[in-house]
Image: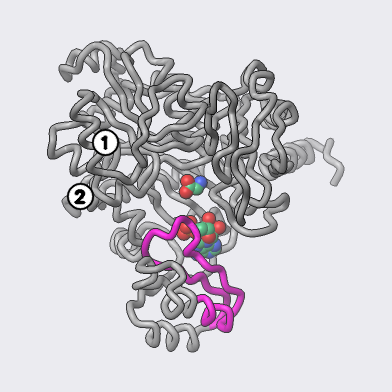
Amino acid sequence: MRTHRTVRDVLYNIAWREKVKVLVVGGGGREHALVWKIAKSPLVEKIYCAPGNAGIQKAAQCVPIAADRVDDLVRFAEEERVDLTVVGPEMPLVLGLVDRMNEKGLKIIGPTQKAAQIEGSKAFAKKLMKRHGIPTGDAVVFSHRDEAATYIRTGSGPLVIKADGLAAGKGVLLCRDRKEAMVALDRIMLEREFGDAGNRVVVEELLKGEEASFIVFTDGRTVVPMPTSQDHKPVFDNDEGPNTGGMGAYSPAPVVTEEMHQRIMEEIMIPAVEAMAELGTPYRGALYAGLMIGEEGPKVLEFNARFGDPEMQPLIMRLESDLVPILIAIVEGELDGIEVRWDPRPAVCVVMASGGYPGSYEKGKEIEGLNDAEAMDDVAVFHAGTRNLAGRIFTDGGRVLGVTAQGRDIESAIKRAYEACSLIRWEGLHYRKDIGRKALKKILRSQSNDNSIYGSGSE
Ligand code: AMP
Ligand code: GLY
């Protein structure tokens, strides 16, 4: 039987100080959730966050360094003798923050620049998956526009055209037919709408099914899954309107059955971590697979080299174990000795956004009702784009808050999250009213199927 160490064992065995100073990089809802959880740890002496936001400020000292200012972050961590840095967004990872911190002997959670290519280059990720038999959509990578155009012309059926590099989640264009695919190709490679991210394109088959997010902790060898979750990317109810950074999330995602969970671990997550180690670029940190669950099983849409946002907001709420020993174990390659416990109760996060988001929007609207919402049981209001001016809280971004709630079942978690949302006001705010509805429908459908087996169903 595997023995689980206590927190103290981990700290002593690997000669960490008894209490640590932690730096969290980023300033969104995901980072607030991380700070909120880290602040509960008895092992923490101090938390810094760069750059943080008005909610994070309550539990951490915010420092005005943008998340992509690698040199400044390294200097700060050195000067303040930070014991452990945790990175939220992908940009600092792709810019090599982990490598730079490691060169200075500073401990940091996240993949090196080379390992972060799994997110930074879709072509790299596709090649890795192909070589290791990891299920994903068929795809061809092109560096020349004309070759891609010839390929698209000879094909049939719907396609997805993706800019190879980082494009803030916007470089993926779904195309119903060849004509749309040609327009998409030209937007990426001729008009260069996504800049250098469009130096190469990935032309991929369009996959059908339901999406789910699957995130694991890994130290490069051991892979520890978090519960499943699901994001809501389109801005309006019923998945209508343009894509956003995510309008809400819930965990668990009922589309991932126990059998599917096992397949995802065996066919995708473990082989991906093994493949990275084999390449000589071991992957440490959080590895996130965006999946399409279809008739043939799970297929990878993309890998992200980080914790998901907003998914981490409900996930962190469900994490029962202290996060700090888990993070230390990742850095030290000791994840096999750590127990990670999760609360079985579901959690739901509703993102409240500025009027106009994801298009242009105004900032600086005063937010009211935060204290009432925060005072509710089993509710946490994670801040994303907020700013504190003399004790009053104002909007400061497109996605403003992630109102997150737990309940005994998904229905009560949804109800509680929306009750909390109804207490919060500012001019022009908007949010989706159907977060979690898909999960609820799926559960009700499967319950009615179970009932029908016993003759009490309506069919
Ligand atoms: P990505 O950034 O690659 O995850 O793509 C963003 C979104 O585009 C995904 O969350 C999916 O909704 C969609 N998408 C990407 N690739 C495909 C595909 N091959 N088939 C269908 N939808 C896709
Ligand atoms: N939820 C999408 C992402 O974190 O990229």
Q: Nearer the viewer, residue 445 or 206?
A: 206
Q: Residue at x 70, y 52 (%)?
A: 236
- Give amino acid for label 2: Thr
Q: Specify whether residue 408 is in view.
A: no
Q: Nearer the viewer, residue 165 or 1?
A: 165
Span of residues in magenta: 156-184
Q: Specify whether residue 444 is in view.
A: yes
Q: Residue at x 33, y 77 (%)?
A: 143
Measured as percent of width and height from the top left, residue 375 is found at 65, 16
Q: Which mark is residue 145?
A: none
Q: In the picture, residue 178 is in which quadrant?
A: bottom right
How many other residues sit within 10 Å of disc 1, few (<14), some (14-19) or many (≥20)? many
**Image quarter hosting the N terminus:** top left
Q: Nearer the viewer, residue 284 or 432?
A: 432
- Give amino acid for label 1: Asp
Q: Which residue is mark 2?
A: 281
Q: Which residue is mark 1?
A: 219
